[in-house]
């Protein structure tokens, strides 16, 4: 990973799991960090666990809620890099047992949430900055029973990432 000294980095999902690991790695390389998740308590615990005073801000936001995401980017302004690992465990039912409400919740949280984050992030991303959205490797593996929905959503991230760069506005 490059030297991130003086760079402003946002990690959506930075209060646990993969995102917390990304947060720790960016701090090691000198970034000023904003970690985002729904639970303010989890964010505070993560901030303490990261153990670097003064370079970690937290922002409680639900990425499925447009007003929350608009407020996040209003607060952060121009930034350099965004990583979103946020998500909830995927449905894993065999296709003939699919719980559609569960599927809709997963799509709203993982895919629609990422679209909302990209919508507002694109407005204040600095020149030379980046946006990274993680999905999962299921789409590249041989199909597994119960893997239809998670593979479909993971695959859709590839296409989500391709088009927005054509109309990014650049700042600074
Ligand atoms: N761990 C793996 O091996 C693996 C492999 C492939 C794919 N994945 C997928 O990657 C995603 C993250 O995995 P993980 O292991 O890092 O999970 P995790 O430890 O549960 O972390 C999820 C993070 O996302 C945040 N989050 C969830 N929904 C959110 C929302 N609507 N708005 C804002 N923040 C939200 C959580 O905070 P709050 O709960 O406070 O919102 C938390 O910070 C999941 O979708 C998972 O299915 C994981």
Image: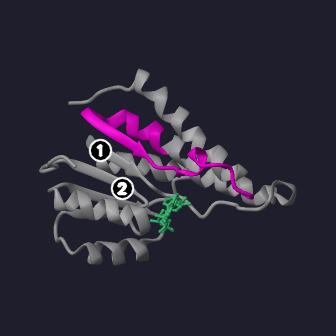
Pinpoint residue 40: horizontal percent, then vertical percent. 42, 72
Name the mark on residue 66: none
Report the front residue among 150 and 32. Answer: 150
Among the 4 quarters of the image, the one containing residue 36: bottom left
Among the 4 quarters of the image, the one containing residue 85: bottom left
**The residue at label 2 has a CB less than 8 Å from ligand 1:** no
Report the front residue among 87 and 120. Answer: 87
Magenta-colored span: 117-146
| Crowd around label 1: few <14 · some 14–19 · many ≥20 (10 Å) | many
Among the 4 quarters of the image, the one containing residue 167: top left
128 magenta-colored: yes
Q: Is residue 127 left or right of residue 97?
A: left
Pinpoint residue 156: horizontal percent, then vertical percent. 59, 39
Query: Disc 1 to disc 2, how far (Cα)?
Result: 9 Å
Pinpoint residue 67: horizontal percent, then vertical percent. 51, 49
Pinpoint residue 41: horizontal percent, then vertical percent. 42, 77
Q: Kindly identify the residue that appears in the image at 74 percent across and 58 percent down.
A: 146
Q: Is residue 59 visible?
A: no
- Secondary structure beneath disc 2? strand
- Return the residue at label 1: 81
Viewport quadrant of the C terminus? top left
Q: Kindly identify the residue that appears in the image at 52 percent across and 36 percent down.
A: 158
- Return the residue at label 2: 11
Which residue, as the protein is rendered here, is positioned at the far front? 142
Q: Is residue 97 left or right of residue 160?
A: right
Is residue 35 placed above or below 169 in the rendered structure?
below
């Amino acid at each position: 990973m490059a030297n991130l000294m003086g760079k402003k980095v946002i990690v959506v999902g930075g209060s646990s799991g993969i995102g917390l690991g990304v947060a720790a790695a960016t701090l090691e390389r000198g970034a000023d960090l904003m970690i985002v998740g729904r639970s303010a308590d989890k964010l505070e615990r993560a901030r303490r666990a990261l153990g670097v005073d003064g370079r970690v801000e937290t922002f409680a936001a639900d990425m499925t809620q447009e007003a929350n995401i608009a407020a996040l980017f209003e607060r952060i302004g121009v930034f350099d890099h965004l990583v979103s690992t946020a998500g909830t465990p995927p449905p894993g039912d065999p296709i003939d047992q699919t719980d559609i409400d569960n599927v809709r919740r997963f799509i709203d949280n993982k895919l629609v949430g990422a679209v909302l984050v990209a919508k507002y992030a694109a407005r204040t991303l600095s020149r030379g900055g980046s946006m990274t959205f993680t999905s999962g490797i299921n789409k590249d593996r041989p199909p597994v029973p119960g893997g239809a929905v998670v593979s479909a959503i993971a695959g859709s991230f590839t296409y989500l990432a391709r088009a927005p760069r054509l109309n990014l506005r650049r700042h600074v």
